[in-house]
Amino acid sequence: MTLPRFYPILDTGVCERKKLPLDSAARAILEAGVRILQIRHKGHFSRDLFAACESIAAMCDEAGALFVINDRADIAALLNAGLHLGQEDLPAVEARRIAPAAVIGFSTHNEGQLHAAADLPADYLAIGPIFGTASKENPDPVVGLGELKRLRPLTSKPLVAIGGITRANADQVFAAGADSVAIIGDLYDGVGNAPDLRNRCEEFLRL
């Protein structure tokens, strides 16, 4: 598959802290012209959140963008969405049984995990954190640009770089071999409303 170069992540915790309604934030991101959008939620998946995801899935479908659910294979299957899995989530083989048609991404953090992911039923791999990040409470060790460049030839699958990537350093990440950059922190830093969020996405797209 070919991944869009810019991979924004709609983090429910960040949106709550910034008082950004999920549907408004998703609409702003999609109006900027993005072609992939992941929703990242680490807490209880309530009925209200499921309803919001249904709405966002419809928006993505209308915009021609791939909608990706973090962690939850069951929700991805119900919404006909993509799925992104971490090292401690449901194994990719089992997730594929639940969501057989889903685009599946899988997170890795080092050479060993990248090798282990070679035979998994994943359509793309993520690696990071490339730089220091505040988006996780207990982040994995920083990978760095040099290691990203060294590891890039180890997989033929599309590779998404994540962790501390900003408008200022994204070009270096692409130069090191990433096919796509997943953005959380710099997507919301200094953003106070939906129009700001759309403008920020447009900045990334121009890169």
Image: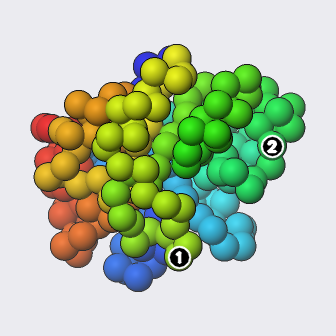
Does 176 sit above or below residue 90?
above
Locate residue 164 relative to residue 129 in the image: left or right. Answer: left
Q: Residue at x 77, y 37 (%)?
A: 92
Q: What kind of residue is marked 1?
A: Glu
Please name whichever residue, 189 or 172, is drawn nearer the observer in this view of the structure.
172
- State the scheme by which the image is colored: rainbow
Q: Residue 21, image x and y in percent?
A: 42, 70
Q: Residue at x 75, y 45 (%)?
A: 73
Would you say the residues marked 1 and 2 are in contact, meaning their CB atoms lie under 8 Å apart?
no
Does 2 sit above or below residue 146?
above
Q: Residue 70, image x and y in percent?
A: 61, 52
Locate residue 114 relative to residue 14 in the image: left or right. Answer: right
Whether residue 166 can be seen here: yes
- Tell how many labels: 2
Q: Quadrant of the C terminus?
A: top left
Q: Residue at x 46, y 31 (%)?
A: 151
Please name whichever residue, 63 or 5, is drawn nearer the observer in this view of the structure.
5
Locate residue 133 relative to residue 85 in the image: left or right. Answer: left
Q: Earlier in the sequence, mark 1 or mark 2?
A: 2
Secondary element at tag 2: loop
- In three-dimensional space, the C-alpha distance between marks 1 and 2, rounded to whole angstroms, equals 23 Å
Q: Residue 109, image x and y in percent?
A: 55, 48
Whether residue 98 can be seen here: no
Q: Residue 188, image x and y in percent?
A: 29, 66
Locate residue 77 relative to residue 190 in the image: left or right. Answer: right
Q: Please rate how many residues cluster around mark 2, counting C-alpha atoms within 10 Å: few if below 14, some from 14 to 19, many from 20.
A: some
- Which dot marks residue 91? 2
Q: Residue at x 73, y 23 (%)?
A: 119
- Which dot marks residue 73? none
Q: Which residue is mark 1?
A: 137
Secondary element at tag 1: loop
Q: What kind of residue is marked 2?
A: Pro
